[in-house]
Image (spheres, coloured by chain):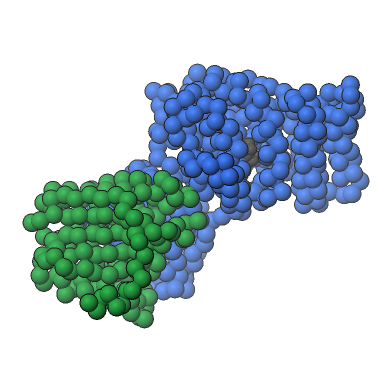
Chain colours: A blue, B green
Amino acid sequence: MLAAPFQAEFDANSQEFSFAGVVRPRSVDEIAHSISMFRNAIEEARGVLYINVKRLAQMNNTAFHAFSRVVLDACRTRSDIRFVVVTSSVVGWTERMFRHLGKIEPQITVEVYDSKFYPGQAFVEDTSFIPILRTQTKMTWRHERKILPRHGMRPGITMADICCGIGDFAVLVRKEFQPARIVALDHSKASLAYARDVASNFGISDIEYSYGDASEMLLEDNQFDLVTCRHSLQIFNQPDLLLKELYRICKPGGRVYITNEKNSHCLGEPRAQSIQWTYNEVARLFAHFEMDVELGPKSRRYLADAGFDDILVESFMVTNQDGDPQDFADIITAWENVYAGEMAVKRGDPPEFIKRFRQGFRDHIFAALHPKGYAGWPIWAASGRKPL
Amino acid sequence: MNAAHRQPAEPKFEPLLQFEMEMGTFLSDWHHCDQLSTYMARMISHNRTDPLRHSNFFSSALNELLEVSFRGGSPEGRIGCAVYRHGPKERVKISFPCPAGQRQFFREAVARTHGNDAYARYLDALSTDLAPSREVVLLDLAINFDAEIRLEEQDPPSITIVVDLPLEGIVS
Ligand SMILES: C[S@@+](CC[C@H](N)C(=O)[O-])C[C@H]1O[C@@H](n2cnc3c(N)ncnc32)[C@H](O)[C@@H]1O
């Protein structure tokens, strides 16, 4: 899995000591330095010390005992300090192993860091998103299949689709481009279950669907020719962190491909004004939950800041003329349900606002289904090369 | 034989992968444990529901077993490790030459993983021992990986530790 070297770090500001990577020493002497750092951190800490093992991919018993020893001894000499061990639901054994410490000393609690780790998580992992994702991918695929080869897609490559949702993109790519290997990762168990189900119904057994956290992946460095991440940077409150992970797992010379929206630029005729008002509000609503659905045109900057070169940015418009207009209308209905029906309610918006907010979606649908109407949803597709 | 009575319906485990090497070569570098466990875990996990996480979990368990044989094995003879599968379970059979004096020790350590006090012993070792003993490593497998562990001793001076790991169920 992760060939990452072992890292032990203390952040005094957040009183957080974190362990990451693989640590399998033969004897304690090999980790003496980290152990003494850990001791010093505990000495310095007041109140609560967080022990972050979210990215600890492997730790053998020798190391586990040595670090546990330090914490348990500290509990015995310092009644003023508490420890919170933060494990990840992704790395199953850490939770199983560390939870015992809490049984030994009540000053130690073990938490599983999970779905609430950033503000918008609950909405996007909700199963009500599944129908939206399905129709969206169906409509964007018409465009993406044509542009993907410009962004590094070709037969025989090793690729990863991060934040893969219900996995339909991976299935389409597999059929059209025949990559040698596809890893598809998401943090929604419901979406993954759906993805695996669809794959098995199609007799597909070679897409590696994996439960994981895109901002802390257990994938090795430098292993994919192409890393795709669609419609997802825009829902992270720290897109740069996610991009850093995508960069890390990409091979030098390989590419990272991202797609994002600029929601306020959704448009339609007739009833343009009402539509525009609503989509401006969509952008604000997402911003309230720390998600930037205006990210599309910022892709170039994000990619450049993350260290990519040979950056290519293009945009395309999904419209009511891409196949069946009803498909377009279905996407908008799904948006209305989640954005007006759930998110605005959650933000505490008054009924008058929600009414007007809903109206814009309905007008967009009206435009989409109108015989002379036009309705559009613009998307920015961008990629960059990881320098050799 | 008695054993046949005790385990009447042994399910059929399919072989997946195995390796064998001179014990001397194995013992020449500690990193062999890490490398072999990482590699084997990856190979056998590719067709599990969640290959990445299965491989991570499996590698943890296999590495501990390899470390046990590294620490407890003697340099003459060969080490062999085979992985089998039956449904959601993998079976690891690891054989290595081990000094006569160690055999009794392994018997006891394996027996303790079946004892009612296994968890209490494990907690006790965590809270008092300075370094993990081989007994604790086996307890760790039983407790944290729900492993079923037994010993086979047909072929002295080698012993074989047989470990059934129901990881597919834990991972997905
Ligand atoms: C807007 S959807 C896009 C899904 C898919 N790429 C598509 O275009 O259909 C965002 C996806 O990100 C996933 N996600 C959210 N947080 C995640 C995290 N921390 N790690 C991995 N996936 C995450 C959600 O479960 C959801 O499937």
**Relative vertical location of residue B51 with respect to residue A229 in this rendering, above or below:** below
Residue at 39%, 51% (x, y): give it. B56
Please name the residue shown 71% across and 36% down the image: A135
Where residue A157 appears, as percent x and y from the top left, is 44, 28
Residue B66 as seen in the image, left or right of residue A179: left
The image quadrant that residue A362 belongs to is: top right
Name the residue rendered at 74%, 32% in the picture.
A263
Residue plotted at (10% across, 56% down):
B77
Residue sticking out furthest to the bottom: B116
Measured from the top left, where is residue A224 in percent x and y?
44, 32
Q: Is residue A136 above or below residue A35?
A: above
List x then y, in percent, for residue B29.
17, 48
Q: Position of residue B143 (x, y in %)?
A: 38, 69
Residue A228, by quadrant, is top right
- For ligand 1, give the image quadrant: top right
Q: Nearer the viewer, residue B142 or A254?
A: B142
Residue B36 appears in the figure: yes
Is residue A48 depicted above or below B29 in this figure?
A: below
Q: Is residue B1 left or right of residue A260?
A: left
Name the quadrant containing residue A301: top right
For the N terminus of chain B, which image quadrant?
Answer: bottom left
Decide if residue A44 is on the left or right side of residue A231. Answer: left
Q: Nearer the viewer, residue A239 or B87?
A: B87
> Is A38 placed left or right of A386 in the picture?
left
Residue A85 in sight from this viewpoint: no
**Residue nearer the viewer, B108 or B140:** B108
Query: Number of marks in the image?
Result: 0
